[in-house]
Structures are given as C-alpha cells and as structure tokens.
Image (cartoon, helix red, strand yellow):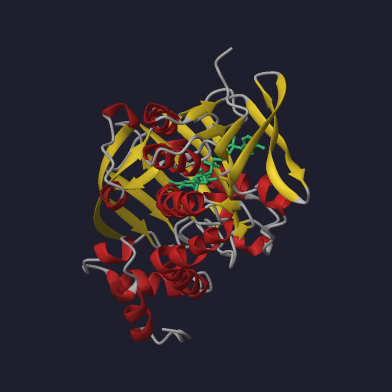
Amino acid sequence: MIKIDKEVDVIIVGCGPAGSWCAKRLAEYGVNVIVLDRNEEIGTPVRCGEGFSKTIEERLNLKLPSFCIAQKIDGAFIYAPNGKFVEVKGFGYVLERKMFDKWLAIEASNAGAKILAKSYVYDLIKEKGKIAGIKANIVGEDMEIKGKIIVGADGVESMIAKKAGINTTCSPFLVDSGFEYELANIKLRDEKKLEIFLGNEVAPRGYVWIFPKGKNRANVGVGIVGSNEKGARYYLDKFIASREELRKGSIIEVKGGAIPVGGFLRDMVKENVLLVGDAAHQVNPIHGGGIGEAMTASEIAAKVIKKALDKNDSKVLKEYNTLWYKSRGNTLKKIEKLREIVEKLSDDQLNKLAEALEGEDIYDITHGNYLKLVKTLLKLGFKLAGF
Ligand SMILES: Cc1cc2nc3c(=O)[nH]c(=O)nc-3n(C[C@H](O)[C@H](O)[C@H](O)COP(=O)(O)OP(=O)(O)OC[C@H]3O[C@@H](n4cnc5c(N)ncnc54)[C@H](O)[C@@H]3O)c2cc1C
C-alpha cells in the first residue's frame, strides 16, 4: 500500500472539480493535503452535461489537454417553445468529464497532494468537542486521519456539512433534477453548437439540452424542478421520442443527478470545516453549470485556508464567506432572481422573448451579463423587482 500520513494540514472529502482544484492550489502553497473520494475511479460515474465555457478556462488560467475535450463549441441554438430559435455566439467545450476530473486529480497529485480513490469518508473525529479529522474506509481498510482543516467538497448531498452542523437544507424547488443519455449514431444540426430547448411542456422550470460530443454523438439531457411529479426521465424520453434524428440513436451512457440551482449558503464555514462546490450550492442558477463555479470557489478557499494555517487561527476561515460573495456569490444571487422571473414565463411569453431577441447579439447574456435580457424583459412589459 502507498504511504498515507495519519496527520495532515488539510483533509478534502470529494475529488470532483472542487476538491481537486482546492488540493492543487493548497499543494502549490506547500500545504500537506489529502483528498479522499469514495469512487473507485476518479471522474466516474459522470453526473454532468459536460458543458464548459472558455471564459472559465481563461478565468482559471487552465490549459485543457486535448484528451479532456470531446468537442469544441462556437455557439448555441436556443429554441423557444414554438420552435423558433435564437443563435448565440460563444466559445467553449463539451468535456470528456471522466478524463477532465482524472486530469485535475493528477494535476493536484503532481503538485504534491495525496489523492485516494475508493476511500469513503463515513464520519468525523471529534476531540474535546472539536472536529479533529475523518474516519474513512480506504480501499477496504478502516483508517483515521487527523487534519487541522476539513474541506467538504463532497457534492450536493454533502455528508460533511451535515456531520459538521452546517445547514444546507433548502426547498426542493431550489434543487433541479437532471437526467441525461449520451446518445451515439444521432443526427446533429451542427456539432459545434449546443442546442437548448425551452418550454413548460418540454421542461418545466428548466431546459432540454443537446451537447455534442463529436459528429453524431451527444449528451441529450433535461433539467427540471426537482419537485415535479413526473420526473426528469419522463420529459427526456418524451422529447427524444418526438425527434426522428434522436430516437434512432443508441444509449452509450446514462447520467443523472441533482443540481442545486439556488439557495446559496450564508455561512459555508463552521469552525475548522469549510464547504466548496456543489456542497455549498455554488452553481449558476440559470443554466445549472457548476464546474467553473466549484473551481473558482476552490481558488478562494485555498487562499483563505493557507492564511488560516499560517496564522494558526481557524477563525480566519470565515473570510471565505465574504470573499466568495464578493467574487461570485452576489452575482449568482442576481442570476437566481432573474431565473425566478424567467421560470414564471408562459410558453407564449417565452416565444415573445425569443422574437424580441432575434437578430440581437446575446453573447453577453450567455456569458453572465444578464443586463440585455433584463432590458428586453422590461421592454416586453414584465415586472422585474430588484433590477
Ligand atoms: C445532470 C447534470 C448535468 C450537469 N451539467 C453540467 C454542465 O454541463 N456544465 C457544468 O459546468 N456543470 C454541470 N452540472 C453540475 C456539475 O456536474 C457540478 O456542479 C460539479 O460536478 C460540482 O463539482 P464538485 O466537485 O463540487 O462536486 P462533484 O463533482 O459532485 O464531486 C463530489 C465528489 O465527492 C465524492 N464524495 C461524496 N461523498 C463522499 C464521501 N462521504 N466520502 C468520499 N467521497 C465522497 C463523490 O464521489 C464525488 O466524486 C450538471 C449536473 C448534473 C447533475
């Protein structure tokens, strides 16, 4: 067996994009960090549409290797319920997330972090009322590891949050349910474009997506409000059945999961425990993209953790709340408000919105500047409190 330190500076639970990126940054700062993930293989199973914007690549100064990219993207077709569409310019990728997550973990490992797959964390160690480490089953063996700081990067159902007493409960209305097939041998309109289908019949409070992964392969999925009685699969199957170019395809992979599309936590820190990524609901509430948000938050978290270690004072960790809200949280909260408005639009209103945006350059909207969308909605006579 490899060497595993029984006492480290930082323990990260979860080796998704949040956990890996936080570990990589911490290791680069010279921090002794260990990351545990319950999955046998980092990156598998995938629960994602795998869309990734170039803006994030630039923001994080990533150099994506070609094996992480299934398809380069240069825009999107956004369809209104009546079938009319708006074409949007915008660059990015559909990732091969299995490879991407693995690559991030290898990058973190190369920087000096210890990564452990098939390592399920089932409890926290408490000493004199303080959290002092984790209890885990590491490749079949029960072990205890002590750490000064614990990071919960363990996804939307964060067990670390619950065990540490960080309240992450939110209304089921703020958690979308996603279901997706990776289909092969299908016909795509344009393999360089994402396709987004809106409408209350197609996807109540959500959308259907076709994210190409090559010439005749794509992730075809749906995200809808989690409280919907029929469930995401019902809407996806209905959509596929209605499309000749899709229903002839083969299912290569089935993916799905919950997407926290709001309900940002006011406090993501409890003593020496801190949450990042989906565990802290750090997802774009309008399109559900969370990879970039998870990694951005991890950059901030890593800086604050380093400072807390240097000062030997876990109270410093609270700065993460302020810094994240300043950098991303306040913007995401605005986007959440906007989503609340858009999700109430009837199909007829969505058609009108698509018509009003026809021929407009809506690159900005798809890249987080929602001002143009707000202005168009106002022009159409919608009441937008808070804008
Ligand atoms: C259907 C669907 C489609 C999506 N599409 C997109 C998209 O196109 N683009 C985009 O940017 N985002 C998308 N997202 C969101 C994106 O997948 C997440 O936001 C992102 O994965 C968050 O990263 P994370 O590291 O916080 O969490 P995760 O990627 O969920 O990683 C958490 C890790 O923690 C591990 N773990 C959990 N509990 C334990 C434990 N007790 N012990 C050890 N390990 C544990 C898990 O095994 C997992 O590997 C989608 C989500 C869904 C469900």
Which residue extends farthest top?
1
Q: Residue 193 vs residue 260: left or right?
A: left
Q: Is residue 328 above or below residue 105?
A: below
Q: Residue 232 vs residue 22: left or right?
A: right
As rendered, which of 244 and 58 lies closer to the eye?
58
The residue positioned 30% from the left and 43% from the top of the image is: 189
Looking at the rendering, which quadrant does residue 327 occupy?
Answer: bottom left
As rendered, which of 348 and 316 lies closer to the eye?
316
The residue positioned 45% from the left and 73% from the top of the image is: 334
State the image coordinates of residue 354 (x, y, percent, origin top left): 34, 69
State the image coordinates of residue 293 (x, y, percent, origin top left): 43, 53
The residue positioned 46% from the left and 37% from the top of the image is: 20
Q: Is residue 263 above or below residue 68?
A: below
As rendered, which of 112 and 54 lies closer to the eye?
112
State the image coordinates of residue 209 (x, y, percent, origin top left): 43, 48
Looking at the rendering, which quadrant does residue 88 occupy?
Answer: bottom left
Residue 191 in sight from this viewpoint: no
State the image coordinates of residue 67 (x, y, percent, origin top left): 31, 26
